[in-house]
Image (tube, rainbow, N blue to C red):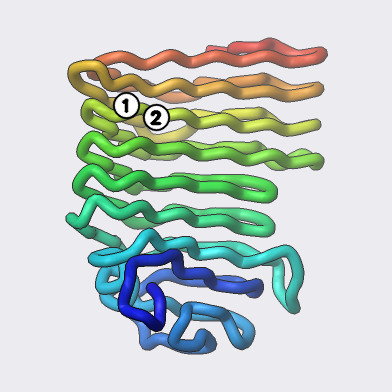
Amino acid sequence: LSTSGLSGDLLLDPYNVTISTGTDSNHNASFTATGNNSIIKTTTLQTALASANVTVSTGTSGAQSGDITVSSAVTWSSGRSLTLSSARDILVNANLTSNGGAVRLSAGRAVSITGATVNTAGGNFTATAATTDSTTGITLNGATINVGAGTGSLTGTSVSGHGIWFTSATNTLASSGSGSITFTGRSTSEYGTAINTNLAVSGQAAVNGTSGSGYGLFF
């Protein structure tokens, strides 16, 4: 969003950030965090997405860990893109629904999608996470990923944790037409990709994994 009225990108600086139905706090009009525990109200974010590509970013420094938590559903139909970029973790605990708009999750450590749906309706979906500790790169627990005719690419890397972990509740992967979803898990010492739960797949999906000293793929 730009002061001249033209479309632009919105940035949100360091600190922990929660996207919820709570009252906007600790960020200014340009979505820059100004204090700990910044809250972005979903309606504020959806209004911005109506006319601009939005980037929510914790930056690289600050008083807190630099996590982004999606606590309440976000829905938009403009085709604009939403990018979440965290210094540490991204926790998607509520639905993200676009109408052809891209969704990008870029975490400095880990991404988790728990009991939530990411539905891009043909837009591309990417998630990347790279951790140097025992944390799993990308965890999916009761998640639904639906890209329609778009492309999904999820890449998780960990040194002593799993690269990607499908765990607990059933996870659902869906694409249509020329759409596809690809998972790539990498680990130095644990499973590249571990599947410890049911996968419901509709359309094209590929699950890959490599490990330095463990199993690349573990079922």
Image-based side of 214 in relation to 10, left or right: right
Q: Do the residues labelled 2 and 1 touch (CB within 8 Å)?
A: yes
* Disc on the earlier residue, 2 or 1: 2
Residue shown at the point (29%, 47%) measured from the top left: 101
Please give the residue where the numbered disc 1 appears in the rendered image: 173
Rendering coords of residue 5 (x, y %): 31, 78
Farthest-out residue, front: 4
Question: Which amino acid does the dot numbered 1 rest on?
Answer: Leu
Residue shown at the point (19%, 47%) measured from the top left: 99
Residue 152, numbered label: 2
Residue shown at the point (27%, 68%) measured from the top left: 46
Q: Residues within 10 Å of mark 2 (few under 14, many from 20)?
A: many
Residue shown at the point (56%, 56%) measured from the top left: 85
**Residue 164 in the image: above or below residue 117:** above
Rendering coords of residue 116 (x, y %): 33, 48
How far apart, in angstroms, are the residues tagged by discs 2 and 1? 10 Å
